[in-house]
Image (tube, rainbow, N blue to C red):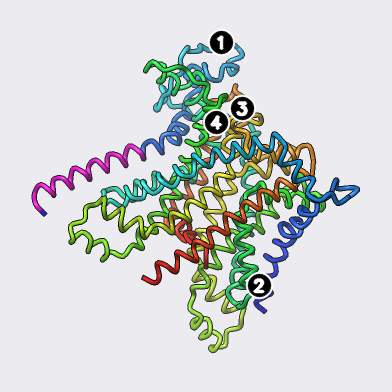
Amino acid sequence: MSGLFLAPSLIGVLLFFVLPFLVVIFYSFVDNSISKQFVGFANYVKVFQNNAFRTAVGNTLLFSAIAVPLAVVLGLALATLLDAGIPMRSQLRSAFLTPLMVPIASVVLIFQVLFDYNGVVNEILVKFGGAQIDWLKSSSGLFVIILLFLWKNLGYNMILFLSAMGNIPKDVVEGAKLDGAGAFKIFWYIKLRYLSPMIVFTTILSIINSFKVFREVYLLTGEYPVGTLYMLQHYMNNTFASADYQKLSTAAIYMSIVMIIIIGAMILFENHYGKDLEEE
Amino acid sequence: MTKRAKRKAFVTKVCLLFLAVVTAILFLTPIVLTITNSFMSASEISSNYGVIFQNATNDGKTYISETVNLKFIPDMVTFSQYITTLFKSPDYLLKFWNSIILVVPIVVFQLVVAVFAAYGFTKTKGKLSAIVFFAYIILMMMPYQVTLVPNYLVLNWMNLLDTNWAIWLPGIFSPFSVYLITKYMKRIPVSLLEAAKIDGANEWQVFAKICVPICKGIITSCAILVFIDYWNMVEQPLLFFSDTDKYPLSIFLSKINAGEVGLAFAVATVYMVPSLLIFLYGEEQLVEGIAYQGGVKG
């Protein structure tokens, strides 16, 4: 009987995700979709050696390597700020959360006004004796994309951290205060200790979100961004356009293997750490 | 506390508040600027931003300032851009309508499918159910680079590319809401459901009269999260629609040609309104929904 409740979702997931994914696996091992000759790992070698693929992977990793630590640390900083007993807490929280609601497409125009070659940021730079930077059409574009990414995602991470902070036992903090521990010591030795599972969770969530970076680049700089902004999704789009199913499938499999490793690491950590904290 | 310590605490708090307020203003600036700029006339926009959108002023009549001029408050507030957007250029209205047509069915039906599935997962015990649920979690976390390929193959096979179904179907069966609602439903005490059964309620009544009402809050949270995700969508229409007339506003906005920068601010503002309204009324649910995602295990 309860299987009946599951049926619609199961059928949909099988039809649109799982079964075609098996086809994707199959495609990654054959020479083309018509003759279907088994070629072993030839496609994997080809995609791995492909320059565009390497550039896309490299750029995406570079973006993640910079954006993820910032997203976690600044998210934690915002949460700590709101948790410090300052007034207007709920208004401030709303302000930090608003970007999450706003579609990227709606603010792209303002970001163009700010970061154009003749834009506001350059004007300020020049006033202070700097040189104009062509933000959106040079490698500095990465900086703008990271800014946009943080602007949109920090609120989300902040909420995750705030919820974890709510679960820190009050008596432990009060006890430390009575023992004369300062705010910094309490944060470093007590709060961080309780927050560490959430820090790992947020890090992994941010890594996953950072892989999705494309929208921002596409909306801000158009279909053909400069080299450093050529992301994995750009590679996929171009491969879609050339209808090369073998390349497409192989790249998707590479990506899913990386994702499974990351998700596996997260679950292992949760199992380990979750127990560790419960035992105390 | 001594007087000095009190004073020190007070100063720290003032500094922190100042820092927080400045950050909050920075966060809101792009949104506020977009909204205020939408009330500028076309000529004010081109005199302010002419340098940036140079090909904008092809008639050569408007004065182009040498420097960019970012303004929070328009010299003269006018609704002309809105009037053009809403009444004179049906293109924008059409794209806005495209967005609604694409997003609303996904939100509604993803939740319907998910509520049923969540009940199914809650009621079925055992290894198989746990493994399937785990597969849902993995699928949920996969980025578009992975999921769009299988989606594309099926849609192509079903001849649904270039129809709205290409966006609807994968969206409706996307496992996000199933995951979140199941996590919540599993916390409902079994004794409550058992008691209802003893009182003579059948499975359907237990589901519809007890489980669903209890889950109202999390269902609203899911609806908001799913809405903002799809309202912002870019990747799927880009790949599944070859006809740009079908594009939602989220993509079309970036394609508005430079000559209509003034209009673009108004369109961008109109596009924000639904999500900002939802935020105004559903902030608590949104926050709860996000907080509930913390920790992947059920």
Give the residue displayed 55% in from the left and 38% down from the top: A62
- Are the numbered discs 2 and 3 placed on the same chain, yes or no? yes
Give the amino acid type for the residue marked by disc 4 in the picture.
Answer: Ile
| Picture disc at residue B83 | 4
Mark 3 or 4, which is nearer the eye?
3
Q: Secondary structure at mark 1?
A: loop
Is residue B112 toward the left or the right of residue B75 in the image?
Answer: right
Q: Which residue is mark 2?
A: A5
Q: Position of residue B25 (x, y in %)?
A: 36, 37
Q: CA distance from mark 2 to mark 1?
A: 65 Å
User: Circle 3 marks a residue in which chain?
Assistant: A
User: Circle 4 marks a residue in which chain?
Assistant: B
User: Circle 2 marks a residue in which chain?
Assistant: A
Is residue B258 placed above or below B202 in the rendered structure?
above
In terms of image quadrants, where is residue B201?
bottom right
In terms of image quadrants, where is residue B130?
bottom right
Give the amino acid type for the residue marked by disc 2 in the picture.
Answer: Phe
Q: Which residue is mark 1?
A: B61
Q: Secondary structure at mark 2?
A: helix
Q: Earlier in the sequence, mark 4 or mark 1?
A: 1
Q: Which residue is mark 3?
A: A226
In magenta segment, residue A56? no
Q: CA distance from mark 2 to mark 4?
A: 48 Å
Mark 1 or 3, which is nearer the eye?
3
| Picture disc at residue B20 | none
Badge 3 density bin: few <14, some 14–19, many ≥20, Cα 10 Å:
some
Mark 2 or 4, which is nearer the eye?
2
Give the amino acid type for the residue marked by disc 1 in the picture.
Answer: Lys
Q: CA distance from mark 3 to mark 4?
A: 37 Å
Q: Which residues are magenta?
A: B2-23
Is residue A208 placed above or below A151 in the rendered structure?
below
